[in-house]
Image: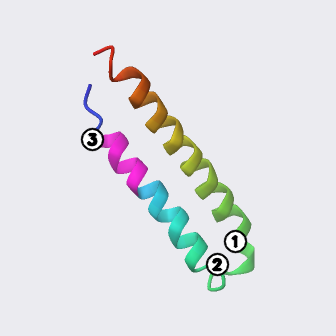
Amino acid sequence: MDYTNAAIFIILAFSLGFIMIMNRDRIPTQLRRGMALIAAVMVLFAFYLIVYSFLSSGSS
């Protein structure tokens, strides 16, 4: 199985989370909660993809 798209998503999700943490003072208060929620969901899904790829790597 090709994990190129998953790898790109994982890198982007962690980058978004890092940017949200580093620039939390510059983000307008109206957008802060929604963007933080979206970033958290993306990072959690990225962790799921990492675990899934490790567990399914032996079966292919």
**Cα–Cα span, label 1 and label 3:** 30 Å
Q: Is residue 33 above or below residue 56?
A: below
Secondary structure of the residue carrying tag 1 is helix
Would you name the residue on which mark 1 appears? Answer: 32
- Disc 1 + disc 2, Cβ < 8 Å: yes
Would you name the residue on which mark 3 appears? Answer: 4
Figure quadrant of residue 55: top left
Q: Hey, what amino acid is under mark 1?
A: Arg
For the N terminus, the image quarter is top left
- Badge 3: few (under 14), some or many (20 or more) residues near its Cα, within 10 Å? few
Nearer to us in this view, 12 or 35: 12
Q: Position of residue 32 (x, y in %)?
A: 69, 71
Q: Main secondary structure of the magenta part?
A: helix
Q: What range of the chain is rendered magenta? A: 4-11
Give the farthest residue toward the bottom. 26
> Measuring 27% from the left and 16% from the top, which residue is drawn there?
60
Would you name the residue on which mark 2 appears? Answer: 24
Residue 36 appears left or right of 47: right
Q: Nearer the viewer, mark 1 or mark 3?
A: 3
- Badge 2: few (under 14), some or many (20 or more) residues near its Cα, within 10 Å? few
